[in-house]
Amino acid sequence: MLGPTQSSYIEKVLKRFKTENLKRRFFPMRHGIKLSKKQSPKTDEELKKMLDIPYALAVQCTRPDVAYALSVTSRYQACAGETHWSAVKIIFKYLRRTKDIFLIYDGGELILEGCSDANFQSDDDDAKSQSGFVFKLNGVWLLGRVPSRLPKQIPPQKLNT
């Protein structure tokens, strides 16, 4: 049997970003959260404040169950606002609650199932559609994410040329 845990790593990450005392959450994202470039800092004062927050480093900390939330928040690394940072703190709250949860592989037969879905024009910044996928390994949900390299769908007219 194999059961890798990341609890000590998660504790270090929470301390590094001064989020170890945040309340705990059951999910890594709020339902219906809408992040956009419009929420980026607009004044020099807001920008200066956000530059003191290690946002870019925070969104690089990853685990499969938070991959989708990370892919959404990482889009705003270049100019993150307080709303974006709040979304990252929700991920930290979830990690704090789930730091001792891990998968156990018993060495038996592995049964992998996968599904995908798309959302038409769901990005407020550029009205592009997004797709995502989720996997189950032996009946346990493993991964649900939008791929970080290609987070948005290619328009059909570009595929046909």
Image (cartoon, grey):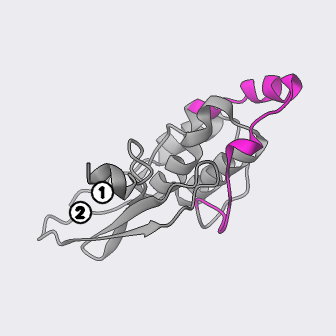
Please name whichever residue, 98 or 153, is drawn nearer the observer in this view of the structure. Answer: 153
Please name whichever residue, 98 or 71, is drawn nearer the observer in this view of the structure. Answer: 71
Residue placed furthest toward the bottom: 139
The numbered dot on residue 3 is 1
Residue located at (68% from left, 58% from top): 34
> From where the camera sits, is residue 107 visible?
yes
Three-letter amino acid code at the position of disc 2 = Tyr
Instruction: Please state the horizontal and vertical placement of residue 43, each as a whole percent of the image.
Output: 86, 28
Secondary structure type for disc 2? loop
Tag 2 near tag 1, CB within 8 Å: yes
Instruction: Please state the horizontal and vertical placement of residue 88, each as a whole percent of the image.
Output: 64, 46
Instruction: Please state the horizontal and vertical placement of residue 80, each as a whole percent of the image.
Output: 69, 36
Q: Assign the N terminus to one quadrant of the image.
A: bottom left
Secondary structure type for disc 1? loop
**Image height of 62 relative to 140, above or below:** above
Q: Which residues are magenta?
A: 28-56
- Tell me if 109 is positioned left or right of 144 in this view: left
Instruction: Please state the horizontal and vertical placement of residue 12, each as a whole percent of the image.
Output: 56, 36
**Image height of 43 relative to 86, above or below:** above
**Image height of 92 relative to 103, above or below:** above
- Sort mark 2 into few (<14), some (14-19) or many (20+) by Cα contacts within 10 Å: some
The numbered dot on residue 105 is 2
